[in-house]
Image (cartoon, coloured by chain):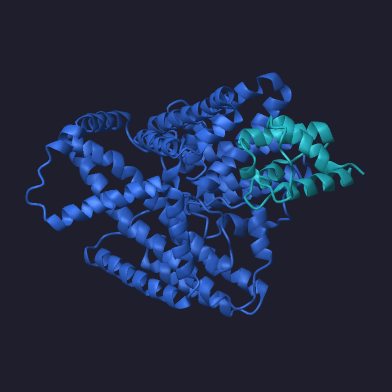
Amino acid sequence: MAVCSLAFLFFCAAVSIVYHLAPGKWLRQLILACASGLFLAPLVPDLRSWVWFAVALAGTYVALVLVRARPRGRVVVAAVTLVLLLYLYLKRYRLLAEFIPFEIIPFPLAWDMRLHPVELVGLSYMAFKIIHMLVDQWQGQLAPFNLWTYLNYQLSFFTLTAGPIQRYNDFLRYWEEIDLKPSDMRESLLFWIRILTGMIKVGLIGAYTESVFHSAAGLHRTSSDALTVFYAFPIYLYFNFSGYTDIVLGAAGLLGFRLPENFNRPWLARNVLDFWDRWHMSLTHWIRDYVFMASYKVAATNFPSAARYWGYVLLFLAMFLACVWHGATDGFVIFGVLNGLGAAATRVYGDVLRATLGRSGLHAYMHNRTVRIFAIMINLHYVGVSLLFFNSDINRAQAILRGAVREIAHLPTTVFTYSWEGMPVAIEIALLLFVLVLLTAAWKFDAFSVFIARLALRFSTRNGWLLTILCVQCAIVVEMFFFDWAFQQEPPPVLYMAF
Amino acid sequence: MRDVRAELQEIFRQVFDDPTIVLRDDMTATNVEGWDSMAHIDLLIAIERALGVKFATAEMSRLKQPDQNIGSLIRLIESKLQAG
């Protein structure tokens, strides 16, 4: 079942109604488990995939039980290694397949991934969850678990396909303390608004930017096409994935579960580290906790005098891993290298600034509005360049980059020689006003943010306003799906489901 | 009984190289200049060495959450010291 679809909307409504009519905690847990099963069933294509799904779940659960029985470092290392090997085998990364002869792995021929690849939805997210459980269990930080809670945590339909990566203790808190009070009208309206906002992001804005991006990428004759691809792809990716996140956060909220946020205005980030702290946050925080902090702690404890340099290297590696996780193709490797270098360079630059400007100078620098706008613009384009290699062929990415740079170099000529003839005056004025508003918003960003927050608060405290917004969104979404149906289009897929 | 707050304040001043830091329970990472992920680990390692406690990965992570503050850190350290 596609998350951005009318079917999922009805699914959410049906589950929510049945769930809230159910009288007890156990019954509600059973309804949630059935809902996850119903959601999962159509996503697993064949028997082979079901068997591998069961093998992955049973194997990881046994590993977890072993770590609970013998919480020793070696047992954890062995368990995490096995999980990673299973993950790499099932994912069959293209780059690794060139070096590792997967076919020599002694499985019966019928189960050979090379001949019969299986589709395991949410495999990466399941791997992140089990690794965090193994480490936390070893360190005595994991809440009690059993097969029932483990399966529901791993297969929860809110987070199964593309995250966000919820921690087990957070999941269990909501699972065990299911709220039996009648749901609050205002909260329910806000969650429905969030679901519909997500659907509009994925199905309308995301689908539109995807079509712009694909048509420009398909043509790819002029440098103007290249520039369109350069700007359209990040916009498409953002609306596609943040829209998905809105949908699942809203769906979970309807049933009393709170999931971690995944986005916090990433295009306002002033450097690569800041960007990853705002983009796919649940993944970044997982990498920060279980890769960067764990390894940096070992390095800083054992080599205190060289801790800073180790920090740069580990920061690069952590960011590289966060990117390469998407898929070990050559494009993702370059995406990882660029972001790793960006993260390490950010840290080096920060240390240099601190050493040269001093504490007060650094404070003034960080709060300087002009510096912030320049930093945002530079970061926006750096991340944009790295995203060209995201899930893309290197030669194609290079060609797009060359075309975009050529177009930007000619931008002053294009602007000054642009013919405004034939364009209605009203549109010219509207365009100028739009640019002015954008510039004002960027310059007076803090005041603008406060204004927007106040406006949102005013609307969100009155159910009448919320109901009006919901009705407008319903009309847009129904029309959106009607068009899909009339033109026999599939609902737009969520790109991150492929990872 | 150890004065955890005073010892912690001294550690903060050394790690962030700022002798003017005065800890309050409601202070968070945003109130201390330079408290990023690396400084967070440096801080926790310094606390482990000075106070003889150990932090698990999940605890280090939890202390980075927006709802956590100096009060939470002090309570966590005190509970670890009491547990021995």
Q: In front here: A438 or A349? A: A438
Residue A117 visible to the viewer:
no
Q: In front here: A311 or A424? A: A424
Residue lying at 19% horizontally and 31% vertically, measured from the top left:
A410
Query: If the image is split into quadrants, where does the N terminus of chain A sit?
Result: bottom left
Residue at the extreme right of the image, as rendered: B1
Residue A150 placement, left or right of A459: right
Residue A441 placement, left or right of A228: right
Residue A425: % across, % down: 13, 55
Residue A401: % across, % down: 28, 31
Above or below: residue A32 compared with residue B19: below
Residue at the extreme left of the image, as rendered: A422
Q: In front here: A85 or A13? A: A13
Residue lying at 50% horizontally and 51% vertically, measured from the top left:
A262
Above or below: residue A102 compared with residue A431: above
Of the chain colours in the picture, the one used for chain A is: blue
Above or below: residue A452 compared with residue A280: below
Above or below: residue A86 compared with residue A188: above
Of the chain colours in the picture, the one used for chain B is: cyan
Dividing the picture into quadrants, the one containing residue A491 is bottom left
Residue B63 visible to the viewer:
yes
Residue A285: % across, % down: 57, 43
Residue lying at 24% horizontally and 41% vertically, measured from the top left:
A228
Query: If the image is split into quadrants, where does the C terminus of chain A sit?
Result: top left
Q: In front here: A424 or A444? A: A444
Residue A86: % across, % down: 56, 39
Residue A203 placement, left or right of A323: left
